[in-house]
Amino acid sequence: MASLTKQSSETRLTTENLLRGSVLVYWLILGVQIFAAPVPQGVINSATSLTFALVAYFGFGLAFWVNTRDIAFQILGWRTILLLAYQASCGFIISTELLYIVAAEIPLVLPARAANTWIILQTLLLTAWIFWLDQTGQGNLVFLQLPQLPHVLVIILTDIGVFAIHAFAFFMGYLATSESRARRAAERLNAELLATQELLEQSSRVAERTYVARELHDTLGHHLVALKVQLELAHHLATEGKAKVPLDDALALVKELLNDVREVVSEVKKPAIIDLCKAIETLLAGIKNLSIHLTFPVELKIGEPVHAHLLFRCVQEAVTNALKHANATNLWVEFKEDQQSTTLMVRDDGKGCSLLHPGHGLNGMRERLEAHNGRLEIINDSRQGFMLKALVPKSDRPLP
């Protein structure tokens, strides 16, 4: 039993990891500025407040580190929302400059629609916060020092400046996320291309073996049989004389050659084994967003190119669904076989859905399987994720 587990973690230097590191450096420098300032800022006006602010500040950094640990997954989960809410609260209480970090973090950890909603709500709250600070004279926000302008205009310009920095931080995070998604999509498509080429090469070799065997049998084999018949006739007619010995040798040689051709044809016609496991491993190597667990029995042999292609496309479609719709973190791909069929089972730990409406991908998969007497079974549970089961028969007879 061949088993492969591929983790989704990435340790290489990427745009989002660079942004993550830059944000942490900014967070550290901001902490020095806040807590080493000669004039206390925000709530830092007593020993108790200082302790509270320090705990909240380091909690902010820990929350950012945990929340951005798996930035390949923009999933709307309660943990992500609660950590973001905690960080935003720290920004309003300790220093509004911490909200710039939250603005850059939002597109890294939330889906696009949720990220846009969050940044709008945060900006509106910050605007109200700025006007409240102006009215009460509390807080840690530094207003623009423009005494020659009306006070209301100074407040408005301060609000616009804060909003501009928020927008800049948000779009930096958005660009990093877009680049990351495009890079992962390119890696996945490249892996799909390599795997498809690998499967095509194996299928081509099988087709070439079949073609060579057929041509040897239909051309050379028939000609050798005709030559053998003619030599046997000549041998029968030449009962005496010098020609009999060469005819005996020629006839023996033709018989030997005909046996060799038959052996070669039989050898070439033996069922070729397609290495489907290698093609699928190549396909899964390009998936960075999932931890993939592949189980492929060593004894599983697939000789029909069309069956290998069917199973390969099923895995490809299942991976695409898990990435696009399921918000899954783990994917299990398992192959089994019995005397009647080869079975593929793919399941994930995603959100699933209570009511399934199969799209073009699943419908196309079902149609391809049914065209070759196969079957597709879909098991969908909003509590246990999504699972599909594809059965491909080993013979031309329909499955029971």
Image (cartoon, rainbow, N blue to C red):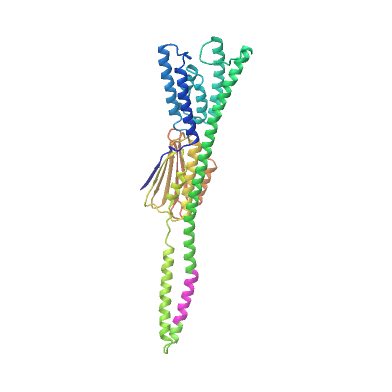
Measured as percent of width and height from the top left, residue 381 is found at: 45, 35
Q: Which residue is the extreme one toward the front?
A: 38
Taking the spot 46% from the left edge, 84% from the top edge, the residue there is 234
Image height of 240 relative to 95, above or below: below
Taking the spot 43% from the left edge, 80% from the top edge, the residue there is 250
In reply to whether residue 221 is colored magenta, the answer given is yes
Q: Magenta residues, as a range? A: 218-232
- Can you tell which quarter of the image residue 6 is in? top left
Image height of 231 relative to 241, above or below: above
Q: Total number of numbered labels?
A: 0
Image height of 394 relative to 104, above or below: below
Q: Nearer the viewer, residue 247 or 30?
A: 30
Q: Main secondary structure of the magenta part?
A: helix
In reply to whether residue 122 is colored magenta, the answer given is no
Q: Nearer the viewer, residue 231 or 155?
A: 155
Taking the spot 51% from the left edge, 46% from the top edge, the residue there is 190
Q: Nearer the viewer, residue 383 or 133?
A: 133
Taking the spot 42% from the left edge, 22% from the top edge, the residue there is 58
Measured as percent of width and height from the top left, residue 393 is found at: 44, 52
